[in-house]
Image (cartoon, rainbow, N blue to C red):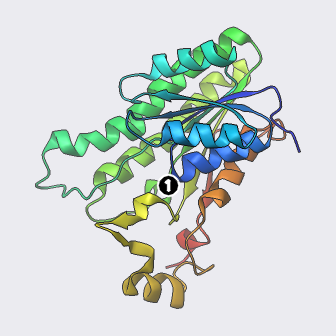
Amino acid sequence: MNDLGGKVALVTGAARGIGRAVAEVFVREGAAVMIADLPGSDGAATAAALSRAGGQTAFVAADVTQDADGMVAATVERFGRLDILVNNAGVFYPADALTTPFERWLQAVDVIYYGAFHCSRAAASVMVAQGQGGRIVNISSVNAFLGAAQSSHYNTAKGAVDQLTRCLAVEWAPHGILVNSVAPGFVETPMAIVDGVNEHETPDFQEFYVRRRRIPLARPAQPAEIAEVVGFLASPRCTYITGQSIVVDGGLSITF
């Protein structure tokens, strides 16, 4: 298929993990892709690898909390337009709600929620001016509607992303911009590795989530499984879905 031929996409946090997998799907489907990630990340290497594989890609070093307008401008300058934005940039670290300094607690909200807002506004301004609609896909999480200790910052930010998705979907529908989010559960990404240990391989995870099937499909997702859903939501095949959060978690959130 070549669903995205002639389209231009900007993917934030695209150096590794879900973001890279999304970029790979977009390239496969014919889109030109701007890989956005922090300075010093693997973003340039990711863009180069996709280019060697036949993709039309470029890299912009940018921080979503500061450079939203710049990364959108760089995309338009490089490829001439912008049709798709994927807000994937994120961060997680344990944060005790009683003792973590507020500035540290707020960092996750700045990256995940405010970053998505600023990037969405910058991208939508271009899409409106082009007059041909567009697609915005936010990477949320099942944490948006579940509780967890040491995670109030992250869960709050992801919940805000889902609410932002709904509000922007209503506000920008007259411009033909569809806004949706994808909510993964456990995914095999670098974020799963803490202090050199893959949390998905620990005895506790294997016992509770795999053998006892707290995840009915009894495994974490691969990044490509999330990316395929993003690819559909960004494609011309998605014509009547907007303001939705699509859960891709192997059944995790339907068990108790």
SS for tag 1?
loop
Position in image of residue 247 (x %, y %)? 61, 58
Position in image of residue 20 (x %, y %)? 58, 47
Position in image of residue 204 (x %, y %)? 37, 85
Q: In the image, is 216 to the left or to the right of 104? A: right
Q: Residues within 10 Å of mark 1 (few under 14, many from 20)?
A: many
Position of the N terminus, as image quadrant, is top right
Instruction: Choose top left, top right, bottom left or bottom right for residue 169.
Output: top right
* Residue found at the very far top of the displayed protein: 129
Residue positioned 47% across, 17% down in the render: 70
Q: In the image, is 19 to the left or to the right of 29? A: left
236, above or below 201, in the image: above
- Judging depth in this view, the residue of 163 and 7 nearest the camera is 7
- Judging depth in this view, the residue of 156 and 91 nearest the camera is 91
Looking at the rendered structure, the kind of residue marked 1 is: Ser
Q: In the image, is 179 to the left or to the right of 188? A: right
Position in image of residue 120 (x %, y %)? 53, 26
Residue positioned 83% across, 31% down in the render: 5
Residue that mark 1 sits on: 141
Q: Is residue 1 visible?
A: yes
Q: How many marks?
A: 1
- Judging depth in this view, the residue of 66 and 143 nearest the camera is 66
115, above or below 219, in the image: above
Residue positioned 52% across, 90% down in the render: 211
Instruction: Choose top left, top right, bottom left or bottom right for residue 192.
Output: bottom left
